Image (cartoon, helix red, strand yellow):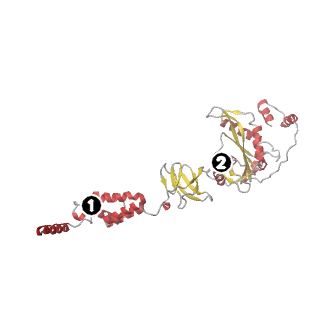
Amino acid sequence: MAIWQDLVDSHGFSDKYASVKRFVRKQRGSAAPEARVVIETAPGEEAQVDYGAGPMVRDPKTGRYRRTRLFVLTLGYSRKAVRLLVFRSSVRVWAELHEQAFRRLGGATRVVVLDNLREGVLTPDIYDPTLNPLYRDVLQHYGVTALPCRVRDPDRKGKVESGVGHAKKTPLRGQRFESLEEAQTYLDRWEARWADTRIHGTTKRQVAAMFAEERPALLPLPMEPFRYYQYGESAVHLDGCVEVEAAYYGAPPGWIGRRVQVQWNATHVRLLNAVTGQLLREHLRQERGRHRIHDEDRSPRTPLSTLQLLNRAEKAGKHIGTLCRQLHGKYGQTGVRRVLGVLSLAKKFGIASTDDACSMALETGTCEYHFVRRYLERNPQLPLSLRQVDPLIRQLSLYRDLIESRTRQEESS
């Protein structure tokens, strides 16, 4: 087929494919063919995916030709195929190729059959395989179920194996391209010109005509593409947090020392139960070196230093203590500095004036440090008197009586 197509395109060959086929058959001889199992699928039911060796393409980073990877997705009913070229493979690349194929087809199948390559399957098992988390979530986003083959059993996905071989032997054999875009354009043109218009050897029908029947049976595509993430596994530290790219994110209580699965992208970090996959916590991304912890995950115990500070505020004045308690209850640990600010105002303007200002803040419902400070600055009070000093200081009359008694004792002696 490849020879006949090249003869037609490049040399104006006018005879039919059968004449070239008869000539090649004489050259290659005869061999006993192996039996193959015929697997029939309903329209829109199954697709088979695989990698193959692509053509030599010049790498823009090195300037040298390098072998590409050919991704092929073949529909089980119509044999319509999507062929894509990439330089490198990874879990994300493997998942993105599926997305591109679904969008080229205009829908997704209900099942995808694949072999046990690492990008898709972490632990091969014909009964209960462990799929790669990112690949699994991409397929779930499109409503597709992955069905890995039995190990060393490629016949289960013979349709895509044939699709890979068809492309390697027909349009790409011996070809070199200067860019990946040029190679993909050449492959797409061949797909539309020759692959889709051919009469398939098994179905005896044109591939494009069968795909027109199958396309309405494909699953509709979701409105938005899948939001990709990075993932890993980490232990919860003694502070109850997990480190992700030099920032720290809180886990629920009781998870210290246990391992959790972590998923993150540019905006969010998600912590999941490593066994069940249950979502434990979701956080917005934080700056490097900073923490992000949900309020319900913080320790309910107030630090001793904070309790001592609130006790000082209680002793300073009734309304001062009430305001400071409300500041701490509203802002938590960040309210400690506001409490210190209120006590500094008491030292500067006097306890009586500050207590009056706190009383006004409580009456108006504006329990903020800035309100108390502005109130004191805009309402200057009289100079401090002994009555405005801390109540722990004794009255002046007690000192006078003490001095007089000591003086009489000295005179009598």
Q: CA distance from mark 2 to mark 1?
A: 68 Å
Residue 307's spot in the image, x, y percent? 39, 63
Q: Please name the amino acid that badge 2 sits on.
A: Ala
Residue corresponding to mark 1: 350
The C terminus appears in which quarter of the rendering?
A: bottom left
Which corner quadrant of the image does residue 45 belong to? bottom right
Left or right, 388 with respect to 326, comes to left
As drawn, the label of residue 266 is none
Mark 2 and 1 residues: CB-CB less than 8 Å, in contact? no
Looking at this view, is 153 or 307 the one in front?
307
The N terminus appears in which quarter of the rendering?
A: top right
Residue 182's spot in the image, x, y percent? 67, 35
Looking at this view, is 153 or 88 the one in front?
153
Q: Please name the amino acid that badge 1 sits on.
A: Gly
For the residue carrying disc 2, how many other residues have a C-alpha within 10 Å: few (<14), some (14-19), or many (20+)? many
As drawn, the label of residue 95 is 2
Residue 290's spot in the image, x, y percent? 47, 51
